[in-house]
Image (cartoon, rainbow, N blue to C red):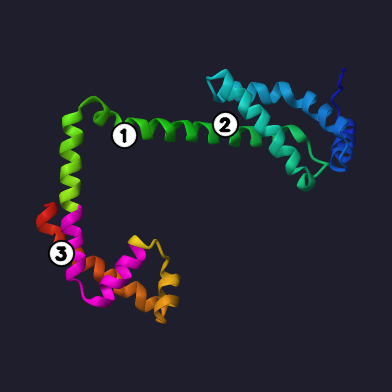
């Protein structure tokens, strides 16, 4: 199927695709796929990542097609979407590698891992002791915030106190803990 690129044809295809015409969507994808492929190839090394970026580009574009202005050229819009998809892939790849790299030392040396675990356990024990020595109101909000994973507004609601009060108590409690833990953590 041969697709000719001109503004009037593209505008008509976009309008048809907005109305749900699958053939128009396929024609748009065929028309712009080479440019999107070049963009993905420029930004990504892996052919698999390039394919993912191309697919994501068209999926996102067709989901957002209702907001696209049919009087404008589609290529710059699609290339921007493709660039964003490529950046997302690069970020996710970097995050995955960072996570593995941060544990690499513990995989290589079991003794280091055991020593770190023992040190961490000791610090956790000292932290629990420090928390138990806090005044009741501070101890309570520290436990709610850090062990109960409650937000400040949830703590305020549960205790019937203003958010500002909870924030200042939380600040003071952390300052007391920091001061009490200083000898343990150096």
Q: Find out whether residue 45 is within the magenta segment.
A: no
Could you tell me which secondary element the residue under label 2 belongs to? helix
Q: Is residue 153 above or below residue 38?
A: below
Q: Is residue 111 left or right of residue 35?
A: left
Residue at point 57%, 24% (across, down): 49
Residue where numbered disc 3 is placed: 179
Dot placed on the residue nearer the N-terminal end, 1 or 3: 1
Residue at point 15%, 50% (across, down): 122
Residue where numbered disc 1 is placed: 102
Rounded to the nearest angstrom, the CA distance separating label 2 from label 3 is 46 Å
Badges 1 and 3: C-beta atoms under 8 Å apart?
Answer: no
Dot placed on the residue nearer the N-terminal end, 1 or 2: 2
Percent x, y for residue 158?
Answer: 42, 76
Tell us which disc is closer to us: 2 or 3.
Answer: 3
User: Magenta region: which residues?
Assistant: 124-146
Residue at point 74%, 42% (across, down): 63
Residue at point 20%, 29% (across, down): 110
């Amino acid at each position: 199927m041969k697709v000719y690129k001109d503004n009037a044809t593209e505008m008509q295809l976009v309008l048809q695709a907005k109305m749900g015409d699958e053939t128009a969507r396929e024609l748009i994808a065929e028309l712009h796929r080479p440019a999107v492929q070049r963009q993905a190839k420029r930004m990504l090394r892996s052919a698999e990542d390039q394919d993912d970026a191309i697919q994501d580009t068209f999926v996102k574009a067709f989901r957002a097609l209702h907001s696209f202005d049919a009087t404008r050229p589609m290529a710059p819009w699609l290339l921007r979407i493709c660039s964003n998809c490529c950046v997302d892939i690069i970020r996710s790849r970097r995050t995955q590698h960072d996570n593995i790299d941060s544990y690499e030392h513990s995989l290589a040396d079991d003794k280091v891992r055991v020593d770190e675990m023992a040190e961490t356990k000791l610090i956790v024990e000292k932290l629990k002791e420090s928390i138990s020595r806090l005044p009741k109101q501070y101890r309570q909000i520290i436990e709610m915030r850090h062990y109960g994973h409650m937000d400040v507004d949830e703590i305020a609601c549960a205790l019937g106190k203003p958010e500002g009060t909870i924030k200042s108590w939380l600040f003071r409690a952390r300052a007391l803990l920091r001061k009490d833990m200083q000898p343990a953590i150096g």
